[in-house]
Each structure stands twice: as structure tokens, then as C-alpha cells.
Amino acid sequence: MNEARDELKGYKGRARAALAEREVRVWSEVRLTNDAGSVFEGVILPRSETLDDLHVVIKMRNGYNIGVHVERIAAIEELGYKEAVYKIPEKEFPVRPHLPRVTLLGTGGTIASRLDYRTGAVIPAFTPGELYGAVPELADLCNLTTKKLFGVFSENMARDNYIALAQAIGEEIAAGADGIVVGHGTDTMGHTAAILSFMVQDPPVPIVLVGSQRSSDRPSSDAALNLIHAVRTAAYGDIAEVMIAMFGPTSDRYGLLHRGTRCRKMHSSYRSTFRTIGDIPLATVSRDSFTYLAASYRRRDPSRQVRIDPVYDDRTTILYYYPGMRPDLVEALVEKGYRGIVIAGTGLGHVNKPLYPALRRAIEAGVHVVMTVQTLWGYAQMYVYDTGRDLLELGIIPLDNMLPETALMKLSWVLAHTGDRAEVARMMRTPVAGEITDREPHNGYLIMQGGLPEIEEWIKSHWK
Amino acid sequence: MAAGERRGEGASRSRKVRRSTRVPESARQPDEIRPRRTSRLGFSGSGAGPKGAGVSQSIDYAEVGFICGLEVHQQLLTDIKMFCRCPARRYTTTHDGEVLRHMRPTLSELGEYDGTALMEFKTKKNIIYLLHEDNVCTYEMDDTPPFLVNQQAVDVAIEQCLMLGCDIVDEVHIARKQYLDGSIPTGFQRTAIVGVNGRLPFRGRWLSITQVSVEEDSCREVSDRGHLIVWRTDRLGMPLIETVTGPDLRTPDEVAEAILLVGRVCRSTGHVRVGIGASRQDVNVSVRGGRRVEIKGVPKASWAPALVHGEAVRQVNLLRLRGELHRRGVRRAAELNIDSAEITDLVAGSALDVLRREAWERWATAENRRPGFELGNGPFAVRAVRLRSLAGTLSWPTQPELTFAAELAGRVRVIAGLDQRPILLHSEKWPDYDGSLAELRRIRRRLHCEADDAVVVVWGPEEDTVTAAAEIRLRFADALDGVPNETRQPFPDGSTDFERILPGPDRMYPDTDSPPTRVTRERVARLRAALPPPPWEREARYAAAGVPAPVAHYLIRRGGAALVDRLAGACGAGLRAACFFVGERLKGLRRAGVAVDEVPRERWCELFTLAAAHPALLQALDRLVRAIAATPHCPVAETVEALGLTAPSADWETSVAAATAGNPPPGRRAAMARAMERLRGRVPAAAVAAALDRLAAGGGR
């Protein structure tokens, strides 16, 4: 049956039969009586396909849902039928000629969303009108255009999406956008920010990735404020780079602007999950101001010519090294035709000795192997220990303080340009967008440890 | 269905304390929250009200079509919270972290914004949550999704449903019920219906139980000042059940009785929490032609009759006000002629502090009202609202001793965030100060008022005064329709004040973070098998044994009934004796500071088993209980022996004879006392008395 028209959406087996037999369907308004004489009046809801086939779900008049076991249904009487329309009130986004033009490119994620009954999941909703209905503050900031490129969760982003996204950004810049916002799921936002930093070079205007950690269907969502911060940054910010704009603290206070190549999601659910690693963030952004923190950044300059370089070879991987890793893993990658391997090594950039022969064979076979550190903070410094020197001798390319995910994105981009060993090494080691920095400032590594008196004192006196 | 926990605890303070705005937190009990600052406003019903307009204070409940039902909230006794692993009911009065948040309205699954949600958004509240690592984790902060629902809580909830005679839901679905007042950091409460269609015997008929849901408790309010509300998160996430009764209650007294009945049923399992704030109720009231109004968080059954009466009177009076407005030709909101103008300059020289900028700024400084937090946007402004042809409505009686102006003040305080007393001034009870009447005349002139126009004046940050004027208009629009659906907060004097618009079902949507829980018939059967008898069955049994009702109720409420039944069953005690022992003796000793609650129940069983064979022990009960409490882990037989209360030697009558010795010989009473000193707990007093009698008769045995 065509799923879009399935009148018993999500129901299977016995529950489906029970509904069909009684000639009621999803969205029927019913009076259901069970074997104990209890009466439930309400709407039959779709059922998540991952649930069992024993229960019928009713949304009762008081708003609650319950599941009734099919064996306990004594009678169902259909009182009416009304298909639910779940829609954000759509109002036309006002045009104000004096305000900057911002384009919001949608990739999916939860910047605006609605519920899907089939899976019980939150799925994205997205037009300027919908956004205006949900976040009317945006109209005070800019003239907004939205383009939905894809509707994927961020874990499903991949090569073709990256290429399409970079091209779309190029088109919007060419069309004169004053800034670009990319709505994106948070899980792989760091990856996308990194690859865009390589594919979109010398942008004249800000390119801001934004998402939310609490879905926008909740009153407490961070989506609206993040979106306001991102749009504000795109419209008025002075930094013409690929950035991530997400909550600074978990409180509703300000957002941080992170450089796309140096940013990482560091908590599975906290609002303040994104952190600049090995440096300080570029700036803070609030509802009404920016505070620039970084010593240098690429400034907004509408006359600058952007270079869109949208290429990507996805025959690459990250090998997250662990003690006792077996060499056949490397061999398998070579055998499967992988062209690039990013090692997230221990400490300063190490792997165990039994891996050496496999790595040597891989490199001899033309695979490009680069080294980053799984500590995330700090440099791969392979001259310090014999292990490191041995690995350099094998031909492994050390990437200093490039983050492993950024290295994967860059290697994928570089390998789409060249297979020449020396050229790959040169390109990988030459920073394009701050992915390698010469210096690590002492405040670039700050993981405060709870429990210490001075930290507790600080936490008490600041909103988290 | 709204949970009544939001403000209940604060309201338990006496009126006098509630007025005090600066109770230091340290001076309060750990279970309390900061008392509500707001109290009833003193707009008196005397004076300008229309004569003979049908002012009502006493009413015939049946005649006005009084309808009332309850939502009783009861915390469950679980080890941990409902959706995370934090300990339950570990309350704190300090904090070690704070979070600042705001709430935005969102959409329900059927696609409409909820009216309450929009109202709460208008109030633009800054919300601060106080955190303490002892009782909250990142779940309560809304920075971690829920863990799977606590099945212990579901079990207790099912058990409660069975006690209430409910049909248990086959598959429990967790829903999100939106609350934008900030009482829950997610902006919604996770709640699920567990049982429906129950009933309890009540006054010779049935009190129907519409539904029972299990849900997470909310935060405790610390303060609510202007645009800043502060919540403590310790209580957040504790499991509770909400029992919703049908609209079956016919008089205010029945309401109090029903609250106590539901409480007894819940507590009879011993699996719910007791103590301050462990149970709170919302009372839903309406009269014919009126609408459901929820009095939220009534902390005690004894408060209910006055509150319910007051609400019934209020609704009757609001319906009469509607009649009066219609009589004046105002039937639709569009026909209301209400406008406002800023009059800051006009009253800049007022003798009344609240109308002058510098006095207001002094107040704001003294109260630590900070721009961007407690204070709304804009400079200080005074705004006068002209109510065309509405003279007399402001002094229209509503609740006993209150007038319609208090209805306006409630909305202004909550929605515009203007909470400096007296919140508003109005032309029908203008305060008396130097030049007051001249000032009112000037204001009326500025607004081009005619004789039958009324005036309301509000003051504060400019934006808020505009909101206030709009809200006053909206409240009058509601008055054209009679009684608006509201939740109202209760005060000890029986009055209530506006809390918010009553939310509808549009604020419910499924919790996509939590899978449904299937409740198998086997699980229900297992829980049913372990249920205690229903309280009314016990009440009847105890009454038949001659136990007074208050003692029986106490035993059922406080969980002593299970012990009583055990003592009277397996241990051979008389039912009446067991009731008095647990319900009176232990209670008295507990109050006297004896640690009777530390004693394992086994000990009391041992005591009564021994006493069954050796009844004299019961005469030394006080001493014995104290000794048992002092060594709770020692078998009672050993305690009895240590106290020398073992059965006496055969020649105990020698002791009685010794007690009569002396020159001159002691009187009978003194001899008895002397003998009992040695024999109490070992020989029944009657036997000692008989021995004395025999001695007096010159006998021996």
C-alpha cells in the first residue's frame, strides 16, 4: 500500500486487522469501549512502526494518549473524521529594503520542526513564512530567503551534500547575499563546517552554520535564539569565514562564533556543546551585540571574489587508534581501495609497532596516511619519541594541531585534487582556514574540573 | 488536569508571613518555598457600586448549579526520580549553580497554539533555575534527554489506580503537557494516564475517578518579581500521581471531605510520601452559566470550603456583571470603548509616591529591580486607561470583600509584570492623599472623561504599562462573556487571585523521547494481590470494634493500619487495643521524642505475642516501649527480662504482704501503689488488688 495514503498508518498485524475490521482509520474520531466498560473518546493516532501490533493509540479529548490492547476492545464507534494538520502558523515574511539580505540554506536538522507519527520522531519544517511564524524576531534583522537543499539528519550528510551545499553558497554569494546561514543537525555540524572551509575559500560575507540541541518543538528549545544569533551574524557580523554559531553557556545568554575548522561537538546533549579546540572562539553574539575575541579573522568585504572548490573523494577514513589494534584493519582498508587514512593517534601521535609493516605497505600502495591526535588538544609532535620518528620515516604526514575530523574532511578534499604524494603532503600541511595554527594560546585549552573550590566558586557566581 | 504543585507550598504560609516580602531563606523550613508576595488587594466592595444590582455573598449551591471536582496530587515514595537517577525528595535550601532560560510557545500535534502558551509568552519572563548537585543532574536542567521511566513509580501508580478502583491502561504513553511559567525547565511536564474510570464510596453514593496519571513534579518557586521568576529544582522530576475526580461534589464541605477521602485511599498503601507539600490539590469550580476555574495548589483540605465558596460567589457575581454590561448595551468586545494615554508628566508632582519617577526609581533600587531582569523595557511611565460608560464596574463585587478591580489587578500583575502595590489605581476607590481628588480630576480631564466613564491608572516601565492597558481591555472583553477559564492561586483567608488562563488540551503532545510502557495483565494481577484492604473496609471494621473515626483515619492515613491488622491478626492482640497502641500510644510517645519509628515492626509483634500469654505486660507498656525504642535491635523477650518483667515467682503474694507492712499500716491505696511498684508488668493489677483484699480479710490463700 502506498504509505502516503495509508489510512492505517503505522499499524500492522493484529492491531491493523482490528481497526480494519471495525472500519475505522487513523484520524477517525471514535468512542472506544473496552471490556471493562471504560469509554475512551478521541482520535485514533498513527502508530510508530517500531512498536508492537497489539495496541491502538487514541489521543483523548483531554490531550492524553493511551494504548488500548486489541483483545480488550469491545466496541469502536466512529464519530467523525478529521485529519490533523500540523503546521507552524505561516505568515508572509515582511520585506524591508533597508535591511541586509540573508539566505538560509536548509539541510535538515531541527532548526524548525514538526512531529512525525510514523516514527514518533521530530522532522524539520522550513519556509520563511513558517520561520517568521515561529521566530518573528528575524524580520527585525534582515530580509530572509530560504532554500531547502535537502532534508536529512546530519549523520546522513555525505559527499554529494557537501558539494551541493558549497555550490549553493557560491550561488547565493553571487546573487548578492549579505550573509548565509546554513541550518544543520548538530551531530556532524563540525564536519560540514570544516569541509565548507575548504570548498568555499575567501568568502566575502559570513557563512554561519546553526542548529539546536533541544528540538524546536519544545518551549525550552535553543533553536530560536541560535537562529537569531546566526541570522544576526550573517547580516551584521564582520567575520567573513565559515563559522558555527551555537550557545556559549547552557543559559539563554549569548552564542559563540567558532571557526569552522577548529570546532567540535563535545557533549551529546548539552546546549553549550560546541567548543573551539586549541584556540579561543572568534566572537560572541547576543541579541543586540557582537564581542570579537580573536586577534585576527577574515573581515567582511563584499568586493572579494569567492572561490568555490567543490570536490570530495570519500575513499578516506579515520582510524581511531587503540592499544592492540591489529594490522589487518589497515590491510583491509587498502584492499577496499581507500586512498587516505587519518590516524587519531595516542599522545603526540603514536601507534604500536605491529602496525608499522601494514602502514608501510599501505603507503607504498599509494595510500596517504596522516597523523592527528586523539587527545584533540595539542600537537602531533612526532620528533619527540622514537615511535614518532619511526612513523615519519614510514611516510606518515604529521598534521600538527589539526582536529581529526577536520583532517578527514581536508584529506577528502585534497585527494580530489591530487594523488601526488608530495603535493598531498604540501596541501595538507598548508593551512587554508586556520585548521593548523602556529601557536596554541594558554587559554586555548581550558577544561575546568568540577569539585575544585575555585571552580565551584566560579560556577556559583556565573550562569551555567 | 493541571498539576497543582506550582504554588501550593508557598500559600501554606499564614497571611501575615506572606505579606512579609523579605523572609530570609535560611530562616525557613527546608520544605518551604518563598511565600507568594502577592496577597488579595484591598479594593472594597462598598461605595459606588450600583444599588440593588444583586450583590451576592451567600448562595444556595444547588440553585446556582454549583459543580466541583478535584485534581489531587500525591508524591510517590520512590528511591529515585521519574526520568533520571537523582534521589527523590532530597530537598535543599541552597544552590551551587544557576541557569537562565526563557520559554517560547510551540505547537501541539493538532496544530494550534495554546492560549495559555501565548499568554505566558506575552509576560516575557526571565527564568532562573537554582541547582544543587545533591538533587539534580543535567536532566533537570534540560540538558540531557530522559532516561527510561522509573518502573517503581509506574508500579506504585498502578497500585494507586487499583486502590481507586480504576481500569488500568494497557499501554502507557508519556505525553508532554506544556507549562510556560517556567516551573519545568523543558517547558513541559512529562505525564501519562495510568488508570481511568474508578470510583470511591462517598456519603452513600459514589465519587467518580475520571483518570489517574503519573507525572513528574515541578520546581518550587523561590520568588516571582516583575519579569524575573526564580525556581528551585530539587523537587523537579519526583514522581507523583494526579487523581482527577468527576464533577460530583455538591457543597464546599463535600470538597474538603473528598480531599481527605482521596488522601486516605492513596496513603493506605504506605507507598506515597507524607509531609509538607507531599500532597496538593487543585479544585475545579463552576456554577451554571459560568466556566471551570481551577483553584491551584490548595495545600490543606480545611482551606477548601472557604475557597470554593468564594469562587462560586465570584462566578455568580461575574455573571451578574455580564448582565449589567449587556444592559448597558455592551455585548461584544468591539463595542468596548477603552483607550489609554500616557500621563507621566501630568502626575509628575503627585503626592503619591508610585506616580512619581524618582520615588519609583528609589523603590526599584531598594527592591533590587534590575533592568533586563526584574524590570521590563522603557523609561518609567504612568498610563491612564479610560473605560467609557463603565463607571461602577470597577467596584462591582466579585469574591467576598473584593471587587472587579482586583480582577484587573491580577491580570496586570501576572501578564504585564507590574507588581508594585497597589498594582493599579482606579476612579472608584481613589486613594486619599494630599491633593488626591484634584489629581483624579486632572486625569479625568486629560482623558476627556465623562461622568459615567471610569479610569484605571498603571505605572512602571513603559512597555509594561502598554501591555497592562491592553490586558485591562481583554479582561473586560472576558467579562462580556461571564467567567473566563482561569487558574487561580489560593490564599489562607479564602480569597484567590489570577494565576493564568486555564490551559486546554492543545498543550499536550507525545513525548518523542520516551517509548510507551506496556502494562501486562500479569503485572496488574501481581500488584493487585499485594494491595491492602480499602480504607472504608478498615474504617467499618475498626468502628465495629469501638475505635473512634479520627483514630481510624489517622491509622489509615499514616500507614499504621497495616501494623494494627498484623498485631490484631497474627499476634493475638485485640483490634481495639492494637488501634489504641499504634494510633494513640505510639503517637504520644513519638511526640514526646521517643524514637518509636526506629523500631522494626517485628518488635511490636513480639511484644503483643508475649502480652497475649502474659497480659500483665501491657500495664508496664510505657516503660516497655521506651526500653524497646532504646534498644530497637534487641528481641523484646530480652528487653522484658532486662526490665525484670518476666513472670513473678510463685510467692509474689509475699511482696503484696510486705506492701501492707508498716506502723501505722498504709492505707489500701498506698499499699496497692507500693505493691504495684514491684509487680507492674508482671502481675495483673486485678490480681494484686484481690490479694490485698484477701490480706485485709485476714486470709492468705
Image: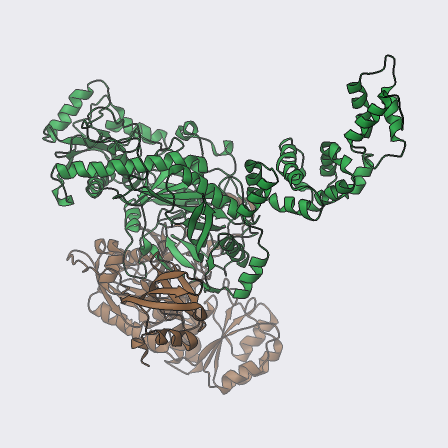
> Which residue occupies the foreground of this view, B701 or B231?
B701
User: Is B624 on the left or on the right of B157, as rendered?
Assistant: right
Q: Is residue A11 visible?
A: no
Point out the residue furthest to the top here: B664
Give coordinates of residue A311: x percent, y percent.
34, 78
- The chain drawn in brown is A
> Which residue occupies the foreground of this view, A384 or B626?
B626
Q: Quadrant of the C terminus of chain B?
A: top right
> Which residue occupies the foreground of this view, B60 or A88?
B60
Residue A4 falls in which quadrant of the image? bottom left
Give coordinates of residue B433: x percent, y percent.
24, 19
Q: Is residue B285 visible?
A: yes
User: Is B237 on the left or on the right of A18, as rendered?
Assistant: right
Give coordinates of residue A107: x percent, y percent.
32, 69
Give coordinates of residue B347: x percent, y percent.
19, 26
Residue B45 falls in which quadrant of the image? top left
Chain B tint in image: green
